[in-house]
Image (spheres, grey):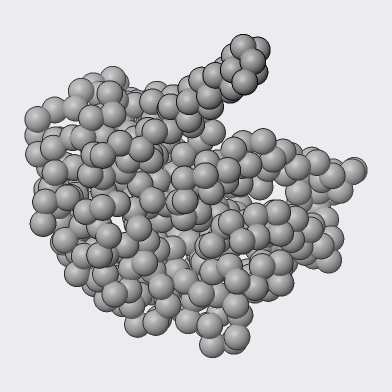
Amino acid sequence: MNISRLFTALSIAILLFSCTQKEQQTEVKGLKQYYTDHFPIGVAIGPRALSTDEAGLIQTQFNSITAENAMKMGPIHPKEDEYFWEHADSIVNFAVRNNMKLRGHTLCWHNQTPSWLFVDTKGDTVSKEVMLARLKDHITTIVSRYKGKIYAWDVVNEAISDKPGEFYRNSPWYKICGEEYITKAFEYAHEADPDALLFYNDYNEMYPDKREKIFKLVNDLKATGVPIHGLGLQAHMGIYEPIEEYLDSALTRFSELNIPLHITELDMSVYKKEHGRRERKPEDDNTAFTPEMEQKQLEQYKLTFEIFRKHKDAIESVTFWNISDRSSWLDNFPVRNRKDYPLLFDKDLNPKKAYYEVVNF
Ligand code: GLA
């Protein structure tokens, strides 16, 4: 080999080494190893995390990935004839490269929708036929692109109302199509990838009123032959939530559906849970992570995972919503710019006390 060839070979080797360095697997035992006999442990991420030190943490700790925002309707389909693939592709490629499971989130939701979706060029609301044709195009394009890579899709997200006495959420989908959009979404996804597992996903699922509505929706979909294969339970929890009282009974109830349950968006806010966005109040300026919060949070996480392990026959996946306390959606919900500490890793990516409660059993 002459000198110039040797030099080229060396340069390529150095380049390859530095590209993969951020993704080096380490020997540290992660959540995924502790839970090998139970369920995969996933995390919701954005594309930026993949070029920071968070990439290494993801590889060490988790064996399943969800795109936090990149596959939602607005970000991925900003104009009717234009898709934006870059962010979703980078997350999919990362998961494939690292041999991780990949959950798709989400094909039909009332939030983070693109502005063109429900109106025509004059700004008038579209007909049911147009709406369903758009939904079909959207679902078919995305599910086909990631066929064989995404094993499970959250097809419809949050279609049930939180209001007592109201069953379906009165979203633009519902107003234009009635409940049929739900069935159609599942059918379109199934046509595009008959091997993908299709999920209905919702929040506040622990609370008896909402729990029973979710149960009925999924049970009815199954009974009418709709291709639904699993139920996604978001599990946005808080340190003051009555987990002991509600989580176990919700999981027992949902197990009766006889379909896999995925915990899809787990986190544990250190504030009192509120379900709607609100204005800032003076007390929101106090955002220290106190020893009391830390203690309460570790107890809640311990309990939560005890209950998950108890239901391991029904639960087939547990995913955290975000990586670490460095940043999470709860820093801006329900109050903008109020720091929260909902995860198992602190802002320096070190395991918190709660982490050890989750892995020592
Ligand atoms: C819901 C959605 C998620 C995400 C969270 C907050 O639970 O399903 O996609 O938007 O809210 O981040």
**Residue 3 location, x and y as percent?**
62, 12
**Residue 62 location, x and y as percent?**
35, 47
Q: Nearer the viewer, residue 298 or 47?
A: 47
Q: Disc count in the image?
A: 0
Q: Residue at 34% of width from left, 26% of height from top?
A: 326
Q: Residue at 26% of width from left, 48% of height from top?
A: 31
82 left or right of 270?
right
Q: Nearer the viewer, residue 325 or 160?
A: 325
* Whether residue 316 is visible: yes
**Residue 265 location, x and y as percent?**
39, 51
Q: Quadrant of the N terminus?
A: top right
Q: Quadrant of the C terminus?
A: bottom left
302 left or right of 117?
left
* Whether residue 108 is visible: no
172 left or right of 326?
right
Q: Nearer the viewer, residue 73 or 176?
A: 73
Q: Is residue 12 above or below residue 100?
A: above
Residue projecting furthest to the right? 122
Q: Residue at 27% of width from left, 64% of height from top?
A: 38
Q: Nearer the viewer, residue 276 or 83?
A: 83
